[in-house]
Structure formats: C-alpha cells, structure tokens
C-alpha cells in the first residue's frame, strides 16, 4: 500500500477505508436477508467466530511485542 516514493498519501487511505465500508455494507445486505440468516445459522457461523477469538487474541498479543 505504498506509492512509488514509499509514502502513503490521503488517496491510499481513502481507498482503504472505502473498501472497508463496502465490505461492511455488503455483509449488512447479506445478513438482512432472512434466507441467508437461516443458512448461516445452519452452518454455525457463531460457533466459528467463538472458536477464532482466542487465536485472534493470541495474534494481537504477539504482534504487540
């Protein structure tokens, strides 16, 4: 995410934040559909998130060192 001279600029930050906003908006659209919520409930997505949280916490602690 660096431009040619090795520095970040406002345009790079804008692209990154707009991409993140599109991901959040898209996830909201998908989760607002009752059929999609039913399918995600069958797959146990909540259980998957609970299983990933300890790994994420460990990763953040290692990165902070």
Image (spheres, rainbow, N blue to C red):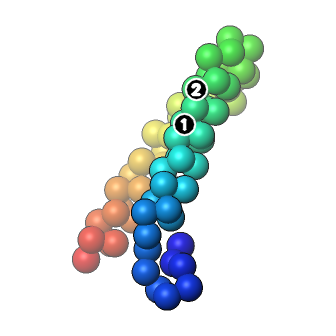
For this rendering, which residue is in front, 54 or 64? 64
Residue linked to disc 2: 28
User: On the rendered structure, is 54 left or right of 16?
Assistant: left
Count of labels shown?
2
User: On the rendered structure, is 60 left or right of 37?
Assistant: left
Identify the residue at horizontal 50%, vertical 64% (top origin): 12
User: On the rendered structure, is 44 left or right of 11?
Assistant: right
> Residue 25, percent across and down?
58, 32
Q: Determine the secondary structure under disc 1.
A: helix
Question: Residue 33's image quarter?
Answer: top right
Above or below residue 14? Residue 23 is: above
Identify the residue at horizontal 43%, vertical 74% (top origin): 8
Above or below residue 14? Residue 49 is: above
Give the residue at the far left of this rendering: 65
Q: Quadrant of the C terminus?
A: bottom left
User: On the rendered structure, is 24 left or right of 33?
Assistant: left
> Residue 55, percent across and down?
43, 57
Labels 2 & 1 near each other (Cβ < 8 A): yes
Above or below residue 1? Residue 5 is: below
Q: Is residue 55 visible?
A: no
Label 2 – label 1 distance at C-alpha = 6 Å
> Residue 11, percent across and down?
50, 62
Identify the residue at horizontal 48%, vertical 50% (top origin): 17
> Residue 14, percent across and down?
48, 55
Residue linked to disc 1: 24
For this rendering, which residue is in front, 30 or 47? 30
Q: Determine the secondary structure under disc 2.
A: helix
- Are there few (<14), some (14-19), or many (20+) residues within 10 Å of tag 2? few
Q: Is residue 18 visible?
A: yes
Identify the residue at horizontal 27%, vertical 71% (top origin): 64
């Amino acid at each position: 995410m660096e431009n040619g001279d090795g520095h970040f600029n406002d345009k790079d930050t804008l692209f990154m934040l707009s991409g993140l906003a599109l991901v959040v908006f898209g996830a909201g659209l998908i989760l607002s559909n009752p059929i999609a919520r039913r399918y995600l409930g069958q797959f146990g997505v909540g259980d998957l998130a609970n299983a990933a949280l300890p790994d994420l916490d460990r990763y953040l602690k290692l990165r902070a060192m």
